[in-house]
Amino acid sequence: MRAPVFRLFFFLAALLTAAAAMAQQAPVPRLVSQEEIEQGLPVDGSRWLTFGGDYYNQRHSPLTQITPENVDRLVPQWTFQTGEIEKFETTPLLRDNVLYVTGPLSTAWALDARTGRPFWEYRRELPENLTACCGLVNRGFAMLGDKLFMVTLDAHLLAFDSATGRIVWDATLADYSIGYAATIAPIAANGNIIVGVAGGEFGIRGFIDAYDAETGERAWRFYTIPGPGEPGNDTWAGDSWRTGGASVWVTGAFDPDLNLLYYGIGNPGPDYHSESRLGDNLYSDSIVALDADSGELRWHYQFTPHDLHDWDATEVPILADIEIDSELRNVVMFANRNGFYYTLDRETGELLVAEPFVRTTWAEEIGVDGRPILLPGHKPTEDGEITCPDLRGGTNFWPPSFDPETGLFFVNAREGCMTYFAWEQEYIPGQRYTGGAGQYIRDDPDMPHYGALRALNPATGERIWEFRYPTPSGAGLMTTASGLIFTGDEQGNLIALNSRSGEPLWSHQMGATLWGTSAITYMVDGRQYVLAPAGTNLTAWALFE
């Protein structure tokens, strides 16, 4: 009988040791200032403080230890497992050798960047009747001062003590029971935390909020659907604005010099039935530029007026300064779900470039007035109509990247078409309100279905190179100053390519796809790590020593 007793003793001892290790709080970080965030990614690789690496969302690291010549020597160093069923869609943040990671089902951890060992964890008790659409995920923290900020699936914004994981304040964004949710990675700007809400498929009225980072008090709200008497409300027939969707579930960008926030806005609802919401349906399928202090709209550009194909503009905007027609322009770059790539002046919203980057059958081109020149026969009906791209679009919410050294914009593109159907549907609070559906086309040789990593010249929209996947990839992208680009395919491989040529250099089978997010990279103790969330695992790689 002694053996079972000893086994039980060692089992309990192991549990206590694990619990004691978990109870150790993270090293107390230095306060994170906005000035530090504005500096972006440092050459020593010691921090990654925002969703996109910097306010501009370029996801371009200055690190050069891992190169095209030695990337094939990458080997796994550690793996962290969430213990949840749902997948990662997060971008981890790094400060003082601690990784701050959000996970599915409103979970979060602080991890040792050297080993993946948890310092603390957070698991939210969620209500049983959640309405959150399309994955019970979270896309990341924001950092400011001594706090971390995360939204939840039941539409709250939480502030954490970054050293302990203790909740400092909890602000309610909206009522989850009527369709609201939140999955976005916040932005910390000017002492406020900027967030948006998901739930466009449930007939919500979308908005972007700012909350005081210290108190959790709401500073301002911008409704993405104008109300009566507001400019743009007349682009919604009757009372359709009340249930028009236009959610905001993907992180924006921030220009501190212009004091402007840039967000892509989701599709109008119901998604497919035109007669339920006649008009352009502002500000759905638009990019909006908001004053960071007041939330006041400075300008907008609508990519797809009166969208009938679920082409959210909830893609990640990238800011940069590039030369166009021999003039240096401050721009915002946007690869859109509708199949067109856009470059706009980020101060005025002037359209500078608009070119298709995948096959598009719904519009011939973007006219000089900035509106698409529509082709006939692409309005969804009860019998169905075929349009390219499909509802997942020419790309989607997975982050693109930009290399300021080569001036190339990178996007994981999708080629595909769909049969779209539409019908009238009654709005019922808390239930899906789409007014139709879609059926993918997979086996028609005239409408091929595949994916491609494409490098574009943002000054012209010209394709410079592409790397094809057998099936579309939902992975985001990250580039490095050494000339690498990291991505993933639908077969579960983490891939490194030469960012100048598109030549594949290395891959590693992760056992799950890199979906909706990208790898990041950082330095600890003079060693460069590549960190990728895939499925329920977070894995770090470094060069073999």
Image (cartoon, rainbow, N blue to C red):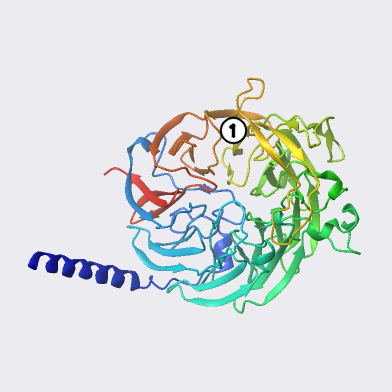
| Secondary element at tag 1 | strand
Residue position for label 1: 454
Q: Is residue 15 left or right of residue 86?
A: left
Left or right: residue 396 compared with residue 76: right
Q: Is residue 97 above or below residue 52?
A: below
Instruction: Please provide percent x and percent y for residue 180.
Output: 67, 62
Considering depth in this image, is 46 or 379 the residue closer to the camera? 379
The relative height of residue 8 versus residue 406 in the rendered view (above or below) is: below
Quadrant for the N terminus in the image: bottom left
From the image, which quarter does the C terminus lie in? top left
From what the image shows, is residue 126 above or below residue 387?
below
Tell me the quarter of the picture where residue 342 sits.
Answer: top right
Disc 1 residue type (three-letter): Arg
Residue 338 shows in the view: yes
Q: Position of residue 248 (x, y in %)?
A: 68, 56
Residue 263 percent coordinates (x, y): 70, 55
Q: Residue at x 44, y 39 (%)?
A: 492
Q: Nearer the viewer, residue 129 or 306?
A: 129
